[in-house]
Amino acid sequence: MSIDPVAIARTGLDVEWQRMQIIAQNLANENTTRVVGGGGYRPLRLRSGPATAFSQIVAAGAVVAEPTGTQVLGVAVDPVGYRSVHDPRHPDADRAGNVYYPAIDHAEQMALLVKTARAYEANLTVLSLAQQMTMRALDLGKA
């Protein structure tokens, strides 16, 4: 069994990069009252998990499966509602003068962004250490 830390770290980088894009999209649309298709903006949440299903690992029995990294399982609509702001002059106001914005928690999105950035950095560190170990092994092979 050989573990490829570079391949595993690359999958982590890909997932965390996509998560950052979703968070940025949510933050950018925090004050969006309508979207092209109609209705209001619905915040998104990236779902990720191991590239190899746990059931496959269990089915392998005594054979230890090689770690294969992580993957994006999908992007789901976050089930938050809307926040109402009374602004009768807004073009998207209803008859009562209320405008509905997505109930995106800015602090929660920023905390998730920091957590995602740290995970991304951890994967970069793995890549760097794998490169250093490879270079060191090549140096030892020269001696």
Image (tube, helix red, strand yellow):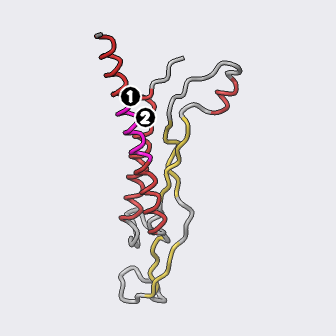
Relative depth, front residue between 91 and 5: 5
**Nearer-the-camera pick, 128 or 35:** 128
Q: Nearer the viewer, residue 79 or 4?
A: 4
* Residue at the spot 33% in from the left edge and 21% down from the top edge: 136
**14 within the magenta span:** no
- The residue wearing badge 2 is 9
Residue 27, placed above or below residue 94: above
On the image, the x and y values in percent for residue 123 come to 41, 39
Label 1: few (<14), some (14–19) or many (≥20) C-alpha neighbours in 10 Å: some
Q: Looking at the picture, does residue 28 appear above or below residue 74?
A: below
Quarter the N terminus occupies: top right
Q: Mark 2, residues whose alpha carbon is within 10 Å: few (<14), some, or many (≥20)?
A: many
Q: Is residue 128 a member of the stretch shown in magenta?
A: yes
Q: Residue at x 71, y 21 (%)?
A: 61
Residue 92 spot, x, y in % from top left: 39, 79
**In the rendered image, the vertical position of residue 81 relative to residue 54, given as above or below:** below
Residue 57 percent across, percent down from the top left = 65, 27
Query: Which residues fall within the magenta stretch?
Result: 119-130
* Residue with the most extreme front position: 143
Majority secondary structure in the magenta region: helix
N-terminal of the pair, mark 2 or mark 1, is 2
> Residue 129 appears at what percent x and percent y?
38, 32
**Do the CB atoms of the residues marked 2 and 1 lie less than 8 Å apart?**
yes
Judge whether 111 appears above or below 116 on screen: below
For label 1, the residue is: 130
Quarter of the image with the C terminus in it: top left
Answer with the quarter of the image where residue 13 lies.
top left
Name the image quarter holding residue 101.
bottom left
* Count of all numbered marks drawn on residues in the image: 2
Residue visible at 34% across and 27% down in the picture: 131
SS for callout 2 = helix
Residue flagged by tag 2: what amino acid is it? Ala
